[in-house]
């Protein structure tokens, strides 16, 4: 429990930021799962259609500091390699 007004404000801010971070994180994870399922099923057209959306979500998360920029780039590279391997 916060003992001062400033500590109470920080607690409120933390709650809001945690919720925002969770929304972004959940969205990124969902999109990554969707494209990985499409790749695993061999649906190249579907995976290619999802790639720009996934890439955008990763870039936005990295830009706002939700995830590290190298992690976003690593995910995009891994997905690009897996798409290139599809026939």
Image: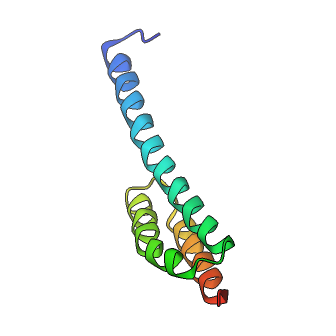
Query: What is the quadrant of residue 11 in the picture?
Result: top left
As drawn, 68 above or below 70: above
Residue 38: x %, y % from top left: 59, 70
Residue 59: x %, y % from top left: 42, 67
Marks counted in the figure total: 0
As drawn, 1 above or below 20: above
Image coloring type? rainbow
Task: Using the image as rendered, state which of residue 21 and residue 7 is in the foreground.
Answer: 21
Task: Using the image as rendered, state which of residue 84 and residue 57 is in the foreground.
Answer: 84
Query: What is the quadrant of residue 32 in the picture?
Result: bottom right
The residue lying at 42 percent from left, 35 percent from top is 19
The residue lying at 53 percent from left, 54 percent from top is 30
The residue lying at 65 percent from left, 81 percent from top is 82
Residue 70: x %, y % from top left: 55, 70
As drawn, 26 above or below 80: above
75 lies left or right of 41: left
Residue 87: x %, y % from top left: 65, 91
The residue lying at 53 percent from left, 75 percent from top is 47
Task: Using the image as rendered, state which of residue 75 and residue 69 is in the foreground.
Answer: 75
As drawn, 46 above or below 62: below
């Amino acid at each position: 429990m916060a003992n001062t007004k400033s500590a109470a404000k920080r607690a409120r801010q933390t709650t809001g930021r945690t919720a925002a971070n969770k929304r972004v994180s959940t969205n990124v994870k969902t999109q990554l799962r969707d494209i990985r399922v499409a790749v695993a099923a061999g649906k190249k057209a579907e995976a290619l259609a999802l790639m720009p959306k996934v890439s955008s979500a990763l870039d936005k998360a990295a830009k706002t500091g939700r995830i590290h920029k190298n992690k976003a780039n690593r995910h995009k590279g891994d997905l690009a390699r897996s798409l290139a391997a599809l026939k």
